Image: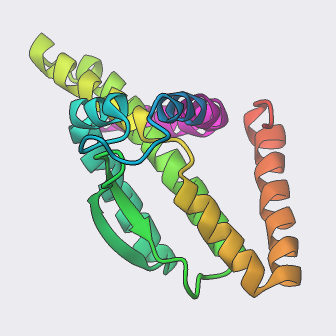
Amino acid sequence: MQTELLALVIANLYFAIAWTPFIVVGVTVLRGIVLFTGRKREFEDWTRNPLMTILSFVFLPGTLLYIGIRYVVTKIAGIKVDRVSGSTTYGELNMFLEIERPPRVAVILTALYVNIVLTVFTAITLLVMPFVMLWEFSWIVICWYVAIGVFYNSGVRSGDAALVLSALRDRPRRGAIELVIVIATIAILYWQLMGAPVL
């Protein structure tokens, strides 16, 4: 059983790394479309985007799991967390990062990449684990429901981009070099180790 679980973890990690670029792009586009459905005017109700708010409530368990992963990764990387709270604009629970005095660009990009890979890995594990462990149908439904919520949160956030830009402003030359190095390293990873298309 332990050997099977270890093989499952390795396989899930492989698929998480291989599929991360596609999932990130897909989820980011999906969330962008949902955001564009919101009102452009000032508040008339308690949220500008009822669809985003509804999805936030529907996928709350997956969001909480995603925030937990993100919090641990950012803390390990030394990225300061401003707060974890609901957005007054869209009624969405989120973890806001402190963009003042950011760490180096390489640290931020590495942390963001690891965060997304771990998020995708967790979601894939939730999809597969019930079948490996032969759980009942009700547990399968619960795991898949949470997994979809985790996938829904695995896109790139505007705060991530703001943090990277802040780090680039603080160290423009070194930051640009680190940006190129990290992107090149990830590209080589997909080209040599995974054989996956590089996005």
Q: Is residue 23 left or right of residue 73?
A: right
Name which quarter of the figure residue 14 lies in.
Answer: top right
Q: Position of residue 84 (x, y in %)?
A: 29, 65
Q: Is residue 97 left or right of residue 127?
A: right
Instruction: Count every numbered label the image shows and give the total.
Output: 0
Question: Magenta segment: does it hold 23?
Answer: yes
33 or 129: nearer the viewer: 33
Q: Is residue 120 left or right of residue 126?
A: right
Q: Position of residue 197 (x, y in %)?
A: 80, 30
Residue drawn at point x = 54 percent, y = 36 percent = 16
Instruction: Evaluate whether residue 1 shows in this view.
Output: no
Q: Is residue 54 left or right of residue 121?
A: left
Which secondary structure dominates the residues rendered in magenta? Answer: helix
Q: In which quadrant will I find the N terminus?
A: top left
Name which quarter of the figure residue 114 lies in.
Answer: bottom right
89 or 154: nearer the viewer: 89
Q: Position of residue 162 (x, y in %)?
A: 61, 66
Q: Position of residue 178 (x, y in %)?
A: 81, 72
Residue drawn at point x = 37 percent, y = 40 percent = 48
Residue drawn at point x = 37 percent, y = 66 percent = 72
Residue 191 in the image: above or below residue 84: above
> What is the span of residues highlighted in magenta in the rendered image?
1-27
Q: In which quadrant will I find the C terminus?
A: top right
Residue 146 in the image: above or below residue 173: above
Name which quarter of the figure residue 107 lies in.
Answer: bottom right
Residue 130 in the image: above or below residue 81: above
Question: Magenta segment: does it hold 127?
Answer: no
Residue drawn at point x = 68 percent, y = 80 percent = 104
